[in-house]
Amino acid sequence: MNLFLDYQVKILLLLKKLEKKNIINLPSNLRSIVVELPPKDQDAIMSCNAAMILAKANQKAPSEIAEILKKHFLNNFNEFEKVDFAKPGFLNIFFRNDFWKIHLRDIIKQGPAYGANKISKKKYNIEFVSANPTGPLHVGHCRGAIIGDAISNLLKFNGNVITKEYYVNDYGSQIKNFVFSVYCRILEITENKTFPNNLNLYPGIYIVGIAKKILKNKTIKNFSNYERIYNKLAKESLGIAVEIIKNDLSALGVKHDNFVYESKLIKNALVQKTINKLEKQNFVYRGKLLAPKGELTNDWKDRQQLLFKSTDFTDDIDRPLTKADQSWTYFASDIAYHANKIDRKFNVLINILGADHTGYIKRISAAVSALSNNKINLICKVTQLVKLLRKGEPFKMSKRKGDYITAKDLVDEVGKDSVRFIMLNRSNEAELDFDFDKVTEKSKENPVFYVQYAYARINSIFRSLHLDIEKKINFNKEHLTFNKYEIEILKKVLEWPKCVTISSTKLEPHRIPVYLYDLVTLFHAYWNMGKINEEYRFIINNKINNKSRLALLKALSIVIKNGMSILGVSTPKRM
């Protein structure tokens, strides 16, 4: 239920009836007529811009159109108490008091579903994190993991079918370097050999942990011949590395539905089959590429190679599918992986990418367009960098050196709830400052605490009244009345479905923590007014001061819980 969209539809139907009666003329495009909240300095519940939009088509001033519409609005909508005109062409709508009773009853009845928009259900594949399985997740992965998970929750809240997926890049030179790093640590432990000073290797302390686990498992008896044991060692090393990643994700409250391994795609010849398919469609050819911009021509070797015609799909250059040794490029494997997604009949593919993958979007979008005949929509969301701050000093991260801040470090320091809420508190397109000092404060400066504290305060009121907030409360026989401060909170509650709709349409979960913070700010301000003026207290002499407020609190708790559930953040009843 979205009150604003509901009335937008109702008002458009009324306008069409008025046109049939020759009362007004309508423009050909009615999409610009909207119903929304009025500015904060106005007391109306809703505002409609119809008078401004219809002025030109009727050759009248917006104020004249407003006078015509006001009369018909009041005649056709009994719940409207009055309609005022506001320049330059808005109709501000006020509701009768009994409207709140009906609407609150609907909110409370819907409960966990309030705000969901289940009109159009789709099947989504959301791929996120997909970090190389060469070590624990760092903070950059952490942000992408949380944003991907929140988008999944958001779309699932709206009734869509979601598959959360992780693509494991377990093939290529980096994996060989990783496995050899583990091998060197094993020799360091068993034979006291010095770990090589090689920039291609992974010297992090976590490699020692992987080596110790392999030695403890005793599935490999003899480490004297690296080539002979490579396959078994690689399988064990990668298995442990992926398990570490899964544990890191679990600490963040993230669980993928599916893990797809690059090595299996290659082993099953899916890469070759996919490239063959593109070749039949004339999207693959043998040719030469010019030297990349900025690279010295003398250092560039011209060679014939297999290329994908990504320029046919607005990419800047065609993209190589094979390396100098004729093995597949990462891009070729990724094309095969996306072909696999398309074969699984998803309506929409979403990739959550790190800041260093921005340049990759055009080529993979081109591949999906080619593979699906432009029928499948691929959406790529890039998550920008996270800066960790403590007392104004940044932490430095280096994956190969092993001295970076891991996702687990972050969760251990401040807790899952704080990590998730703060990571979602800004648009994925903006860099994020994660301030350790702020997220551990118990104040308004710490947004996750502020939202959770509001929910705990609401629960404390219900406990004081010996009521269970989870149980149904019947307000049918009550006459509900609200003061202007309570109506401001209710107006914000009405915005929740709109927030969900915009967040899911634009895939922007950061709108939800921003909305929740604004909502609870109104509540906390009202709570504090009760400390000064008894009229605004929720409880007096162990009784609810006004039973209308109980309905308000119940609706407020529903919205907070629904929003925090989408974010994957808990709502403690006591703090």
Image (cartoon, rainbow, N blue to C red):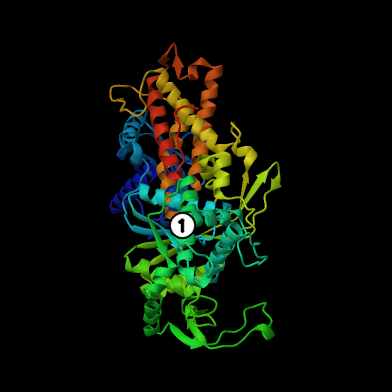
User: Number of numbered discs present?
Assistant: 1
In the rendered image, which quarter is residue 183 located in? bottom right
Residue ranking furthest to the top:
541
Q: Residues within 10 Å of mark 1 (few under 14, many from 20)?
A: few
Q: x, y (%) of residue 234?
A: 48, 65
Give the residue number, with chain letter if any, for mark 1: 218
Asked whether 166 or 63 is in front, the reply is 166
Q: x, y (%) of residue 471?
A: 32, 27
Asked whether 166 or 472 is in front, the reply is 166
In the rendered image, which quarter is residue 266 located in? bottom left
Looking at the image, residue 119 lies above or below residue 238: above
Residue 300 shown left or right of residue 86 in the figure: right
Looking at the image, residue 571 lies above or below residue 221: above
Q: x, y (%) of residue 310?
A: 48, 78
Q: x, y (%) of residue 82?
A: 40, 34
Asked whether 163 or 473 is in front, the reply is 163
Seen at 57% across and 57% down, the residue is 207
Which structural element holds mark 1?
loop
Confirm whether residue 48 shows in the render.
Answer: no
Asked whether 505 or 18 is in front, the reply is 505
Confirm whether residue 164 shows in the render.
Answer: yes
Residue 160 shown left or right of residue 176 in the figure: left
Quarter of the image with the N terminus in it: top left
Looking at the image, residue 181 lies above or below residue 154: below
Residue 275 shown left or right of residue 327 in the figure: left
Q: Amino acid at mark 1?
A: Lys
Seen at 47% across and 56% down, the residue is 240
Seen at 40% across and 63% down, the residue is 260
